Structure formats: C-alpha cells, structure tokens
Image (spheres, rainbow, N blue to C red):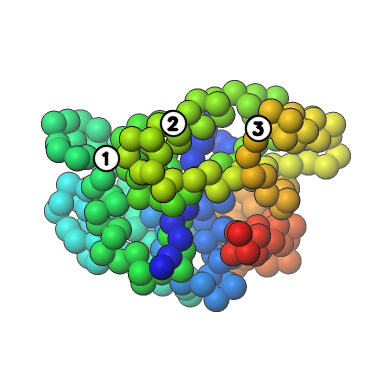
Amino acid sequence: MGRTIAIANQKGGVGKTTTAINLSASLAAKGKKVLVIDTDPQGNTTSGYGIEKNDLENTIYELILGECSIQECIIKDVIQGVSLIPSNVNLAATEIELIGVDKKEFILRNEVDWIKDQYDFIVIDCPPSLNMLTINSMTTADSVLVPIQCEYYALEGLSQLIHTVNLVKERLNPDLEMEGIVFTMYDSRTNLSTQVVENVKSHLNQNIYKTMIPRNIRLAEAPSYGMPINKYDPKSAGAEAYMMLAEEIINR
C-alpha cells in the first residue's frame, strides 16, 4: 500500500513545487515507484518535469469534472520511476465548476483509490491557498509535509495551516497526519536562518526533518530545463539535500 503525501503551505514561494519535483525524483532514484499529482493551476510541477502543459488533452481538471478516467490523465515515466497527473490554468475554474456538487471534497480521493496500490509514494503538490483543491489533496493524503522558508514571516500562516489540517482530520479524513516540516532556502551563513529554525522548533510540536534544503542556484535553474535537480546537476548541494530528505521520508 503506497503512502500519499500532500505538500502544502498557503504561503507562496516557500519551495512547495521545488520539493514536489525533487522529492519525487529522489524517491524514484532510490527505487520507489512514484506518482506526482499537480493540483496547482499554475502547473509548475508539470512544466518542471518538461511537460508542455498547455498542449494537454487530459489533466487533473478533466479528471475532477469526470471527463476522463485517472488512467487517461496519467503521463507515465516523465523520468524513470515517476509518473505525473498534470495541471494547467484551466484548473483555476474548479471552484466555480464544483458549486453544488455532492461530496466534492472527496473527488480526488475516489479517483486515486483506483490506482493507489500501483505506487510506493504519491506526492501531491498543493496550490498556495486553502481552497477546495487543497482540501481534496488533504482528504486524499495520508500525511501533510509543510515546506517552510527560512525567513522572518515563516511562522505566519502556519498555525492557520495546522488548523486546516486538524479540521480536515476531524471532519473528512480521520487518518490524516502531519508528516512534518522541512526547512527550505536555508543559508547557514545567516543568523536569520538559524533563528527561524530555532523559533519554529520552540513554537511547534511537530516532526521537523533533519535535512534542510539549502539556498542553491542550481536548484533554481533546474525547472527552466524541465528537469529535477538530480538529473540537472546530481552533484549539487540541492540534489544531495533532496536525496537525504527522500531517505528520511522512506525511513519514517
């Protein structure tokens, strides 16, 4: 039985998509079979894997509206070991399309149930907001992984996110757990990064991953080449960090 991890934080620019792409690629490099689900209308995970998102016939949008089956919208082996359910800007209309739809919080879960056993890990990249797409991701997931940027406002919005996770657990998905927190854009040369880490540790009673994702220029470049970091520059600090994170997650 595979593990489904939603990567969520309603703050934008914290490294959700970077983590979704590179964690899934690193899990695959460790021999795991991985499905990535892009639930962000920006479709950055889709293009980060080198897929031309605007040319697609079947995406998660068509899946949610019941216009295609989950098999029809999976793009197999975008890299070895990683398959993808893509997204594009059409997904932005989902909220309106789902008004009045019964049990709309469970649409994604009901679809994923068909194929869940075929993968070791399913990684869901959530949009940067607490909307119906994020709720669908959380009802589908076993756990929520929260990337936090090492910056002054890191804790802001985090209590709201944890509150949402608890609400989903209480009302929609009793099995949902907090996978934990991973620090991104960490710069060991600055006091701020160290302070943020200490601050979060002292405020939150959550699992915090030992691996910290460094600020790394190669990591920022990789998506423009449509590659995960372990394909673009496997020797970079960013690639090594995501391999270590994958190892930690496998061993959880």
- Mark 2 or mark 3, which is nearer the start of the sequence? 2
Residue annotated with mark 3: 204
Position of residue 168 relative to residue 225, above or below, is above
Mark pair 3, 1: CA separation: 28 Å
Residue placed most toward the observer, 17 or 204:
204
Residue 21, position as x, y percentages in the image? 52, 56
- Mark 1 or mark 3, which is nearer the start of the sequence? 1
Secondary-structure class at tag 2: helix
Q: Is residue 110 visible?
A: yes
Residue annotated with mark 1: 105
- Residue in view at x 64 percent, y 45 percent: 207
Residue placed most toward the observer, 136 or 92:
136
Q: Quadrant of the N terminus?
A: bottom left
Say left or right for 181 vs 42.
Answer: right
Closer mark to the observer between disc 3 and disc 1 = 3
Residue 97, position as x, y percentages in the image? 17, 35
How many numbered badges does the structure rendering display? 3
Q: Residues within 10 Å of mark 1 (few under 14, many from 20)?
A: many
Secondary-structure class at tag 3: loop
- Residue in view at x 24 percent, y 37 percent: 94
Residue annotated with mark 2: 164
Say left or right for 52 vs 238.
Answer: left
- Mark 2 or mark 1, which is nearer the start of the sequence? 1
* Kind of residue indicated by mark 1: Glu
Secondary-structure class at tag 1: helix
Q: Residues within 10 Å of mark 3 (few under 14, many from 20)?
A: some
